[in-house]
Image: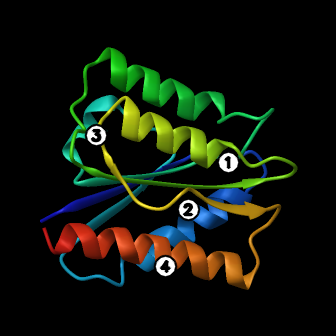
Amino acid sequence: MPKLLVVYDSQTGNTEKMAEAVVEGAKTVSGVDVSLKYHVRPQELEEASAVIFGSPTYHHDMTLPIKNILEDAARANVQLRGKIGATFGSYGWSGEAPKLILEVLKNKFGMRTIGTGLTVLYAPDTSGLEQCRNLGKTVAEKIASM
């Protein structure tokens, strides 16, 4: 059974709400094992068919916990080439984190990325949460059909 791993960090709870909506959308697709994690070991990334990272933008960057997960995975030589990757996050003024993470997934790990990084200004509203559900569903459908 394909595995979808949603890994996130949240400073104010906004990105956490987004992560929960991503999982909610992914769980509408049958035949996919969906997990939501705040902390993850590098090997858990390798065991997944797809990984969706969520991070708020903090000082024009991803948060340190997400950066550490990616650096630990690189040091452990985790193999993610060809797997599906996507990103999301909330922001207050600039919103770069999802795009930066997407670049790392694509250029460092060789993942097949989806989208350009879903961003929501401040707290996700009904529309933002629906976009998150759609992201989760889209990624789950991709790995379910592989």
In the rendered view, tell whether residue 111 sits above or below residue 16. Answer: above
Question: Distance of mark 2 from mark 1, alpha carbons?
Answer: 9 Å
Question: Distance of mark 1 from mark 4, alpha carbons?
Answer: 20 Å
Name the residue that disc number 1 marks. Answer: 10
Question: Distance of mark 4 from mark 2, alpha carbons?
Answer: 12 Å
Name the residue that disc number 4 marks. Answer: 134
In the rendered view, tell whether residue 64 sits above or below residue 27. Answer: above
Name the residue that disc number 3 marks. Answer: 44
Is 130 or 11 nearer to us in this picture?
Answer: 130
Q: Amino acid at mark 1?
A: Ser
Does residue 13 appear left or right of residue 52 in this picture?
right
Q: Amino acid at mark 2?
A: Ala
Is 72 or 100 nearer to us in this picture?
Answer: 100
Question: Distance of mark 3 from mark 4, alpha carbons?
Answer: 24 Å
Q: Amino acid at mark 4?
A: Asn
What residue lies at 65% left-to-right and 66% top-to-bottom?
Answer: 17
Query: Is residue 10 shown to the viewer in this render?
Result: yes
In the rendered view, tell whether residue 130 sits above or below residue 33. Answer: below
The kind of secondary structure element at disc 3 is helix
N-term mark: 1 or 3: 1
The kind of secondary structure element at disc 4 is helix
Is the C-beta separation of discs 3 and 4 under 8 Å? no
N-term mark: 2 or 1: 1
Q: Residues within 10 Å of mark 1 (few under 14, many from 20)?
A: many
N-term mark: 3 or 4: 3
Please identify the quarter of the rendering in which residue 132 is found: bottom right
